[in-house]
C-alpha cells in the first residue's frame, strides 16, 4: 500500500478484523515525513521519504490519508472510542458484565433478543430501571447507576461487533437526560430539617416508656449527630464506637475513616461541641444511648435507665459531663438495630433502617415524611448554620463539600433572604 505524504496530512488507523490499533502518530507539519505506527501486534514501523511503502504485514490494517475534515474527525472519534476501551479497569469490566447479564435475563423473560441492543429496547429498559423502588420506597437505581447500565450495554454491543453508538442514539440519550432531570428535581425538593424541627422530633419520642425508650435514645442520638456533623447516612451507620470520643474541652470528636468523598482516606475529625440545651446536646444523647448499649445484657438496668429518663424533655438535665459508659469492645457498631422488645442487637443499624426510623419520627411529630430523608439533616445543618450567619468556609469545614458552589445550592433553595437586597427596601 502506498501512502502519499505530500503536504499536511493525518493518518488514522483502524483494524479490519476488530484488532485495536494502540497508537497512531503523525506529523502535523508539511514536509515532515517520519511516520511511526504501533499496532496491537507490537509491530512498529519507521518510515521516511515522500512516499512510503507499507509492508504487506499490515494487510489487516488499512491506512487512509484523509483530505475531508469531517471524515477525518469521524474516524478520530472512532479511534478515541477504541482508546477508551483500553481505559476500562478490571473492576469496571466486572460491573459491565454483571449489568449486561441482568439485561440478558430481562430480555429472556420478555422474549426479546438481547443482542444487538436496539435503542427501543434499551429506552424501555432505562425506564424500567428508573421506576424500580427499594424496600423504603425510594428509587433503587440512582441516575448515575442507570447511566452506568447504559454504558455497560453500549460496551456489550460494541465488544460483540454491533457498533458503538448506542449511548449516542438520540432517543436513548434523551431518555437518560430525562431521568437525570427528574431525579435532580426530587433531590432539590427534599426539605432541610432545622434545629426547631429536630427539637420537635426529640420531644415527640417516648423517652420514659419501656421498651420504646431504647429506640428513642438511639434515634435522638443518631439524628442530633447527623445534624451536628452533617454526615451522610452511610457514614453515620458505618461508625464504630471508638470513632466518637469525648474531648473534655470540645465535647465530642468524630473521626471518619475513608469515605465516599475522601478516597485517599486522609480521614476527617468532625467536632461536636456541648449543647446549650440538654434536649439538643449531642454529648448528652451519646451518653444516654451508650448507657443502654453497655447494659444490653442486663434487662432490669435497661428498664430502670429508660424509666428514669423524664418523658417531658423540658425536665432534662445535662448528663454530658458524667461518666462515659465503658464497653468491653469499642470496635462494634455505634448505632444498632433494636428489637420490638427493646433488645439492642449486635448488628449495626442499616442505612435504610436509619431512614425508616427518621420517617417514623417525622410521622409521630406531624410532618409529611415524603418531603424529608436523612439528607434533610445534612441539608438542615447547612441551612441552619447559614441562617445563623456562618460563612461558606465555616460550613465546608464540617460538611466537607468540595466546593462553595455546593453550599450555595442550599442557600439558593432554603436561605433566599441571605445577602438579598430585598431586605434593604425598607418595607
Ligand atoms: Zn449535655
Image (cartoon, rainbow, N blue to C red):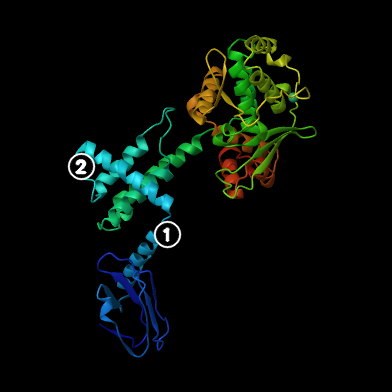
Q: Nearer the viewer, residue 2 or 346?
A: 346
The answer to whether any part of residue 58 appears in the image is: yes
Looking at the image, residue 137 lies above or below residue 98: above
Mark nearer the N terminus (1 vs 2): 1
Q: Residue at x 41, y 40 (%)?
A: 182
Looking at the image, residue 68 lies above or below residue 292: below
Q: Quadrant of residue 79?
A: bottom left
Q: Residue at x 62, y 15 (%)?
A: 297
Q: Is residue 72 rendered to the left or right of residue 280?
A: left
Looking at the image, residue 20 lies above or below residue 179: below
Whole-Å distance between the Cαs marked 1 and 2? Answer: 31 Å
Q: Residue at x 60, y 37 (%)?
A: 231
Q: Residue at x 32, y 68 (%)?
A: 74
Q: Is residue 399 rendered to the left or right of residue 3?
A: right
Q: Quadrant of residue 291?
A: top right
Characterize the local packing of mark 1: few (<14), some (14-19) or many (20 or more) Cα atoms within 10 angstroms. Answer: few
Q: Residue 87: which numbered mark, if any?
A: 1
Where does the image place residue 283, in percent across and percent down from the top left?
Answer: 71, 27
Of helix, strand and loop, which one carries label 2?
loop
Q: Which residue is mark 2?
A: 112
Q: Nearer the viewer, residue 256 or 57?
A: 57
Where does the image place residue 237, in percent across and percent down from the top left?
Answer: 56, 32
**Extreme-left residue of the structure:** 111
Amino acid at each position: 500500500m502506498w501512502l502519499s505524504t505530500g503536504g499536511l496530512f493525518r493518518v488514522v488507523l483502524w483494524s479490519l478484523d476488530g484488532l485495536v490499533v494502540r497508537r497512531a502518530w503523525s506529523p502535523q507539519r508539511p514536509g515532515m515525513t517520519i511516520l511511526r505506527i504501533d499496532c496491537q501486534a507490537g509491530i512498529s514501523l519507521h518510515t521516511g521519504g515522500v512516499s512510503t511503502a507499507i509492508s504487506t504485514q499490515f494487510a489487516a490494517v488499512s491506512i487512509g490519508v484523509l483530505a475531508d475534515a469531517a471524515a477525518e474527525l469521524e474516524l478520530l472519534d472512532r479511534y478515541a472510542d477504541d482508546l477508551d476501551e483500553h481505559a476500562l479497569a478490571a473492576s469496571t469490566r466486572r460491573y459491565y458484565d454483571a449489568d449486561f447479564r441482568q439485561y440478558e435475563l430481562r430480555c429472556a423473560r420478555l422474549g426479546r433478543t438481547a443482542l444487538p441492543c436496539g435503542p427501543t429496547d434499551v429506552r424501555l429498559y432505562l425506564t424500567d430501571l428508573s421506576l424500580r423502588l427499594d424496600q423504603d420506597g425510594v428509587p433503587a437505581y440512582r441516575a448515575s447507576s442507570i447511566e452506568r447500565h447504559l454504558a455497560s450495554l453500549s460496551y456489550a454491543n460494541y465488544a460483540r461487533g454491533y457498533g458503538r453508538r448506542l449511548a449516542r442514539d438520540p432517543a436513548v440519550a434523551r431518555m437518560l437526560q430525562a431521568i437525570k432531570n427528574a431525579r435532580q428535581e426530587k433531590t432539590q425538593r427534599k426539605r432541610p430539617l432545622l434545629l426547631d424541627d429536630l427539637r420537635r422530633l426529640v420531644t415527640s419520642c417516648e423517652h420514659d416508656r419501656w421498651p420504646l425508650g431504647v429506640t428513642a435514645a438511639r434515634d435522638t442520638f443518631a439524628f442530633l449527630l447527623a445534624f451536628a456533623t452533617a454526615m451522610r447516612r452511610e457514614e453515620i451507620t458505618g461508625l464504630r464506637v471508638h470513632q466518637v470520643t469525648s474531648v473534655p474541652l470540645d465535647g465530642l470528636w468524630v473521626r471518619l475513616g475513608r469515605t465516599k468523598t475522601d478516597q485517599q482516606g486522609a480521614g476527617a475529625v468532625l467536632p461536636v461541641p456541648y449543647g446549650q440545651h440538654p434536649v439538643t446536646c449531642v454529648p448528652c444523647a451519646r451518653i444516654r444511648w451508650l448507657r443502654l448499649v453497655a447494659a444490653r445484657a442486663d434487662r432490669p438496668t435497661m428498664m430502670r435507665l429508660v424509666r428514669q429518663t423524664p418523658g417531658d424533655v423540658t425536665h432534662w438535665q445535662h448528663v454530658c459531663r458524667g461518666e462515659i459508659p465503658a464497653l468491653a469492645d469499642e470496635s462494634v457498631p455505634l448505632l444498632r438495630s433494636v428489637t420490638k422488645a427493646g433488645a439492642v442487637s449486635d448488628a449495626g443499624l442499616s442505612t435504610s433502617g436509619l431512614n425508616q426510623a427518621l420517617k417514623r419520627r417525622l410521622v409521630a411529630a406531624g410532618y409529611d415524611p415524603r418531603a424529608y430523608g436523612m439528607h434533610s439533616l445534612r441539608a438542615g445543618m447547612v441551612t441552619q448554620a447559614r441562617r445563623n450567619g456562618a460563612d461558606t468556609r465555616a460550613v465546608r469545614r464540617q460538611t466537607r463539600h468540595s466546593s462553595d458552589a455546593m453550599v450555595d445550592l442550599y442557600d439558593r433553595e432554603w436561605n433566599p433572604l441571605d445577602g438579598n437586597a430585598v431586605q434593604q427596601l425598607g418595607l
